[in-house]
Amino acid sequence: GAASEAEVSPCLSPAMSTMLSQVLTFLAALRLVSGMTCSSTMPLVWRIDQGSRFAYIAGIYNLPSSKGPPLEGGPMAEALACCDVAYFPTGCSLADKSNVTGVGNYMAHCHYYPVTREKDTISERLTTGQVLALKGALQNLTTYAKPVCKESAREFVQSSSVKNLNSSNYRTTLLSLFHKSVEAINPLWCTDSGEPSMESFLRRQWGQRKPIFGLEDISVECQVLQGNTVAEDQELAMYMTNHFTQQGIANISDNRETMEQVMKCGDLLTLKTLVERMKGLPLSSERNLQGRNSNLAWGVQKALDANKDKNIFFAIPVTHLIDAAGREGV
């Protein structure tokens, strides 16, 4: 794990020939010495040797590349340069809308309820009272967002996403609306200037001369956004109404600012505390973390089996490298 250089190197000793899956489990138990006031920055990168081949594991998070750990030079650059094949959560970046290198418009339909559903609008899934309460809670985003996010929160609240909630033609999923709500008050992204995310930056550094594959199929992301039952949407609406308050909005903003420091310092202990604190969030439960951990672990094993003579770079969301809230990490 990442710690002060005198204690534990972020690239594990080359003499350590442990199976990759065992090392991934071991990462969850590492006790780090770096804290939120770390004196130096260090990316979460580990090297694991197995016989004549090796693999690098990089912990990533959805934040602008400039707000994360150093990505040029050092262990991250070494990992990208030394490996033959890379595995990211999905083969194509969800942030890349290009039809050549990215997902194009594939994900657009995932933000809407399928027309085959008996109830395919928020207004059909929630009672009139629930819709009104939800719209009232969304108004709080403008009032209580941090100063840096006031404008993005105002634009979101005044958008059709909020104004058309009770329309029978508004088919955006409630989970998609929740994502947009959180991003509007997220200090890491609310002033987005087109800067690449940490994942996008690493993909660009990797280049196109060596292959990139996905640990999960992109359809998994689509199923998450579209998969809520009516009962789950009603629970989500209640959660949003109860938590889009002054304190709740402050917590959401603060947690994401803390993630910036976690990634810069390589502090998995603080990350574990954060994930445990957020375990009730739809953003945590929506993906059924344990199920996705199993998917990623299965993908890692398949990647190892398919590349027995190659060195592999794994980019894995850092929230899946820890044991939090009673769930096993990857």
Image (cartoon, grey):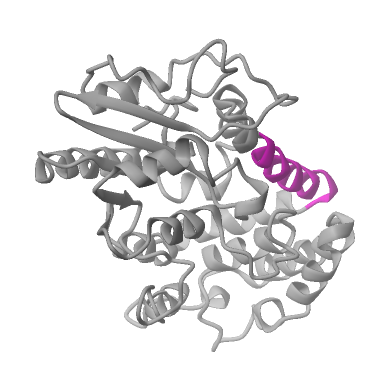
- Please name the residue shown 55% across and 26% down the image: 268
- In the image, is residue 314 above or below residue 210? above
- Nearer to us in this view, 278 or 204: 204
Using the rendered view, name the quadrant where residue 323 is placed: top left
- In the image, is residue 255 above or below residue 207? above
Would you say 84 lies left or right of 199 here?
A: left
Q: Name the residue at the top extreme.
A: 7
Q: Position of residue 274 (x, y in %)?
A: 62, 32
Q: Position of residue 15 (x, y in %)?
A: 27, 14
Q: Position of residue 74 (x, y in %)?
A: 51, 36
The span picked out in magenta is 245-261
Confirm whether the magenta stretch covers residue 246: yes
- In the image, is residue 284 above or below residue 51? below
- Nearer to us in this view, 51 or 124: 51
- Please name the residue shown 60% across and 53% down the image: 65
Q: Position of residue 125 (x, y in %)?
A: 51, 70
Image quarter hosting the C terminus:
top left
- Please name the residue shown 60% across and 37% down the image: 263
- Nearer to us in this view, 53 or 3: 53
Would you say 265 lies left or right of 254 here?
A: left
State whether the magenta stretch is mostly helix, strand or loop.
Answer: helix
Would you say 219 lies left or right of 33 here?
A: left
- Nearer to us in this view, 197 or 240: 197
